[in-house]
Image (spheres, coloured by chain):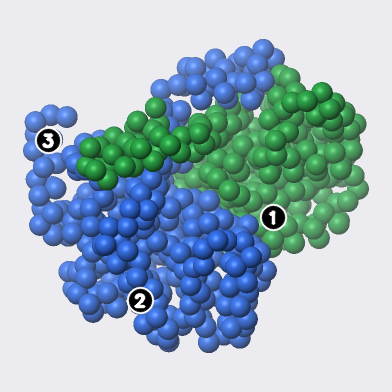
Chain colours: A blue, B green
Amino acid sequence: MTRLERGETAKLLRSLRRGDRRALSRAITMVENDEPGADALMASLKGGPGRAFILGVTGPPGTGKSTLVDRLVQKYRGADLKVGVIAVDPSSPITGGALLGDRVRMSDLALDGGAYIRSMASRGWAGGLSRATSRAMRLLDEAGYDLVIVETVGIGQADIDVVGVAHAVLVVLMPGLGDDVQVSKAGLMEVADAYVVNKSDLDGADSMVVDILAMVKATEGRSPPVLKVSALKAEGLDRLAAVVDSFRSRLSSGDEEMKLRSTKGMIVELAKAVALQRLLLGSETRLARLAAAVLKGELSVEEAARKLAG
Amino acid sequence: MTRLERGETAKLLRSLRRGDRRALSRAITMVENDEPGADALMASLKGGPGRAFILGVTGPPGTGKSTLVDRLVQKYRGADLKVGVIAVDPSSPITGGALLGDRVRMSDLALDGGAYIRSMASRGWAGGLSRATSRAMRLLDEAGYDLVIVETVGIGQADIDVVGVAHAVLVVLMPGLGDDVQVSKAGLMEVADAYVVNKSDLDGADSMVVDILAMVKATEGRSPPVLKVSALKAEGLDRLAAVVDSFRSRLSSGDEEMKLRSTKGMIVELAKAVALQRLLLGSETRLARLAAAVLKGELSVEEAARKLAG
């Protein structure tokens, strides 16, 4: 890095810490696009995560996660917290546009300077999105946001990984989703700190709550709360906020387990990106040689893979 | 591995090579669930990929990929080829059920012993699905399938990676998808060997073909064909099959570049799984130590990640 670049990184960080939204956007764009200065920018943030509470929100598509998140933003803005939202779509760059479209409307509502909303979608290589979202959360933290909500559109492995860096995770479901055994298959049970049964005015909400409670009881030691909410009708939000507040106060009272979990999640997501990038870059000749050996029958594909992984 | 297990693996492989569908299903389940015997099973397949032609089919959701694949299966079953299909959903384990539901109907149609259709969804850890699908393709190859179609539901990075192991890739689009610049953003242009504009009876099909041709011409040296198809109405399928046949004959006439591309893709997908698994397993103590150091301010998260990646 040249002296000029170092100077610019320092200037960007100063503006970001002062609360300059354009500097924040610029910094997130740098990490999103993996620009040359991104590594240096992140390296200049000494120490670990700061004081922001990171809330993960995940669950199947169509359960109303965005509306729920919007309600939480309004609620916490009302309490004068600075709230940042990262809406992540690991499944498809194409839906990124639509998501952003919704968000632009919301962000108009919330454009009071204390709310920042950003969509991020997959681009280019596996691991890139995970790293970019982890870094964006860190930047929002650095910019003085009190609450950072990271929301994903689905419940694939990439979605689960993205919310794995949160201090606490809400899993959003809705009545009529069908066999709730799928919740456990999808790996949601391992990450849920609370379940939200959204669209609670629909038939079957109560029985779904009962089902989730039974499932949780049968398979886990811990017992995350199960909340009935209608984000659209603004029902059940006080109880939801109380649960989120209880998580927040655990963090602010220094809960080591919670801090460790989030920090571990961030380290793992960033380390995955390092490992994958190393694999994908700088080994093209080696890969070509290994592939040739496989085609000659000298190596099996599995052996070649182990050699490439080093 | 015990002698008994070795014996069972050998027996399973013999049955699979004889064309026993139950043995094939059992073997794919082993790699899908990452069962203890899966590594040994794959290690006992010496040498590289064999003679199966692997066709990747990807594109945005809703473009009719499944129907198109079903048509290809019928077509090639008519020509008496053994056809295997792996339908992969990296975005969500929840949609796995629905996809499988459709497929069961199709598989009834095709249940003549020469077609094998299997859905695979994400489970458990990043990298697991990529490895499982690569291995399943290899098993279909070993079981004597002439054509293996790997179809994904979306166009996220995971979908692109999954079809990266194919000898050739069809990118399926449809009229009215909107800004086709998104096709290039999504990384589809790098993988497309042919574009299919499906649902060609809808308005805008011709102009979409023109747009794709222009985009391809402007940005790439090579010029993949652009085909108008209506899978539902069985229109344009002969031309599509002719294009697929031209790819197949490139492979059977020993096209080294095509073989290398697929073999490299398989090695990379398997190597990613090795690298990620190494990161996720066996380093819990190390991770906890690194996270503690970050929380004490001795390390930044980024430094800890580089240390964990080793």
- Residue A301 is labelled as none
Quarter holding the N terminus of chain B is: top right
Whether residue B176 appears in this view of the structure is: no
Same chain, labels 2 and 3: yes
Image side of residue A112 versus residue B287, left or right: left
SS class of the residue under badge 2?
helix
Look at label 1 and name its amino acid. Answer: Ser
- Residue B66 is labelled as 1
Q: CA distance from mark 2 to mark 3?
A: 42 Å
SS class of the residue under badge 3?
helix
Asked whether the beta carbons under mark 2 and mark 3 sit within 8 Å of each other, the answer is no
| A262 or A271, nearer to the observer | A262
Give me the residue at 64% from left, 65% from top. Answer: A218
Give me the residue at 13% from left, 47% from top. Answer: A12
Whether residue B101 appears in this view of the structure is: yes
- Residue A6 is labelled as 3
Which tag is nearer the camera, tag 2 or tag 3? 2
Mark 2 lies on residue = A241
**Chain identity of mark 1:** B
Look at label 2 and name its amino acid. Answer: Ala
